[in-house]
Image (cartoon, rainbow, N blue to C red):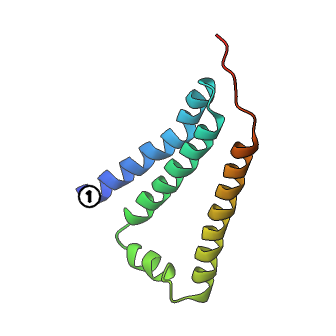
Amino acid sequence: MNNNTRTLTYMSLGLLLAAVLVPFIIVALGRNDLAVGFSIVAGLLALFLWAFSQPERTGKILSALSPSRPIVKFVIVGLWLLVVVVGIFIYLRHASAPPMIHRF
């Protein structure tokens, strides 16, 4: 295992631990939505770093994710639509909510 592979593997492990542990701290501060978002982003980034830290598997991973395959195109379009629909739902939910009054 060379230094680049080892570095990416340790970064992946650190991000995975952060994806599991840091959301508890964020929830304790009262930001549930931010905790979920951080956990998802950090977990996916850890997964990608781990996948690309395996040099003998990188070619297999890239060829499996090739957009020339119909199922990959379907998944990419489906994820894009999911993000758009969820974004619109969140926007409409916040737009129709009454303004919050903070009292200290």
What amino acid is found at the position of numbered circle 1 in the picture?
A: Asn
Q: Is residue 9 left or right of residue 16?
A: left
Residue 23 or 13: which is nearer the viewer?
23
Extreme residue in the top direction? 104
| Displayed quadrant of residue 97 | top right
Residue 75 or 13: which is nearer the viewer?
75
| Displayed quadrant of residue 71 | bottom right
Q: Position of residue 80 (x, y in %)?
A: 60, 69
Q: Is residue 77 left or right of residue 7?
A: right
For mark 1, what is the residue?
A: 4
Q: Residue, x 74% and y 47% (percent of image)?
A: 93
Q: Position of residue 75 (x, y in %)?
A: 62, 75
Q: Residue, x 53% and y 34% (percent of image)?
A: 22
Q: Position of residue 83 (x, y in %)?
A: 63, 62
Q: Is residue 62 left or right of residue 82?
A: left
Q: How many marks?
A: 1
Q: Is residue 59 left or right of residue 36?
A: left
Q: Position of residue 98 (x, y in %)?
A: 75, 34
Q: Quadrant of the C terminus?
A: top right
Label 1: which secondary element: helix
Residue 15 or 25: which is nearer the viewer?
25
Q: Quadrant of the N terminus?
A: bottom left
Does 59 appear above or below 5?
below
Decide: few, some or many residues near mark 1? Use Cα within 10 Å; few <14, some 14-19, many ≥20: few
Residue 4 or 85: which is nearer the viewer?
85
Does 16 appear above or below 69?
above
